[in-house]
């Protein structure tokens, strides 16, 4: 990375500033098929999203094209990458007779024009990875995605579908 002047460094860092919420312990109850599902039973794989030229990394071709599943975009630091990384987007891909798959869905983010996705690519492209787990049950995929998004609160999941937020109530007054 080139040497920055003070103002350039501020501008560079300010554009990449994000607000993360730590929802620990998990305060969301899983619903549907996610209710009794053991998340530790999932096998996670990781691929680099883009190469240094801004094109899809060759690893992307290893994502299954005949399965659905859950995927998580993560930013990994070049300093201690196995320790310092941030989940910034969670999505799902329901498998539909080879017309829609986990690989097809993940590849679409390379051309996606949504502001948050463009920001992900432009600011962190060289540090952007996808962790994914294949799942054979489309209903479970939907339920797990909902649970993971509402539990982890990734910064680029702008809309959390079907999540009901209730008004806080004082526990000591009726």
Image (spheres, rainbow, N blue to C red):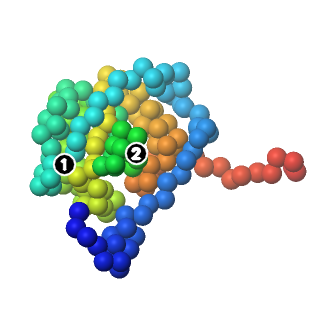
Residue 84 place in picture, x, y as percent: 40, 45
Q: In which quarter of the image is residue 131?
A: top left
Is residue 64 shown to the viewer in this render? Answer: yes
- Helix, strand or loop at label 1? It is loop
Q: How many other residues sit within 10 Å of disc 1, few (<14), some (14-19) or many (≥20)?
A: many
First in residue order: circle 2 vs circle 1: 1
33 and 76: which one is in front?
A: 76
Q: In this view, does 45 lie above or below 118?
A: above
Instruction: Find the distance from the CA under tag 2 to the CA under tag 1.
Output: 19 Å
Q: In which quarter of the image is residue 119?
A: bottom left
Residue drawn 35% across the image and 23% down it? 43
Q: In the image, 20: left or right of 73?
A: right
Residue drawn 49% across the image and 48% down it? 153
Q: Nearer the viewer, mark 2 or mark 1?
A: 2
Residue drawn 35% across the image and 79% down it? 7
Find disc 1 in the rendering and name its residue: 50
Residue 174 place in picture, x, y as percent: 87, 49
Q: How many other residues sit within 10 Å of disc 2, few (<14), some (14-19) or many (≥20)?
A: few
Find disc 2 in the rendering and name its residue: 84
43 and 75: which one is in front?
A: 75
Q: Quadrant of residue 61?
A: top left
Q: In this view, does 139 lie above or below 122?
A: above
- Helix, strand or loop at label 2? It is loop
81 and 62: which one is in front?
A: 81
Residue 100 place in picture, x, y as percent: 21, 35
Is residue 90 shown to the viewer in this render? Answer: no
């Amino acid at each position: 990375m080139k040497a920055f002047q003070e103002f350039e460094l501020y501008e560079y860092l300010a554009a990449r500033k994000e607000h993360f919420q730590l929802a620990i312990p998990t305060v969301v109850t899983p619903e549907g098929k996610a209710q009794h599902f053991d998340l530790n039973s999932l096998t996670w794989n990781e691929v680099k999203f883009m190469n240094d030229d801004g094109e899809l990394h060759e690893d992307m071709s290893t994502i299954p094209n005949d399965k659905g599943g859950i995927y998580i975009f993560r930013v990994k630091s070049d300093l201690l990458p196995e320790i310092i990384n941030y989940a910034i987007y969670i999505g799902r891909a329901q498998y539909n007779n080879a017309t829609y798959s986990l690989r097809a869905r993940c590849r679409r983010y390379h051309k996606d024009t949504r502001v948050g996705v463009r920001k992900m690519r432009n600011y962190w492209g060289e540090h952007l990875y996808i962790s994914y787990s294949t799942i054979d049950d489309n209903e479970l995929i939907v339920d797990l995605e909902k649970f993971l998004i509402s539990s982890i609160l990734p910064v680029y999941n702008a809309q959390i579908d079907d999540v009901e937020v209730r008004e806080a109530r004082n526990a000591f007054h009726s």
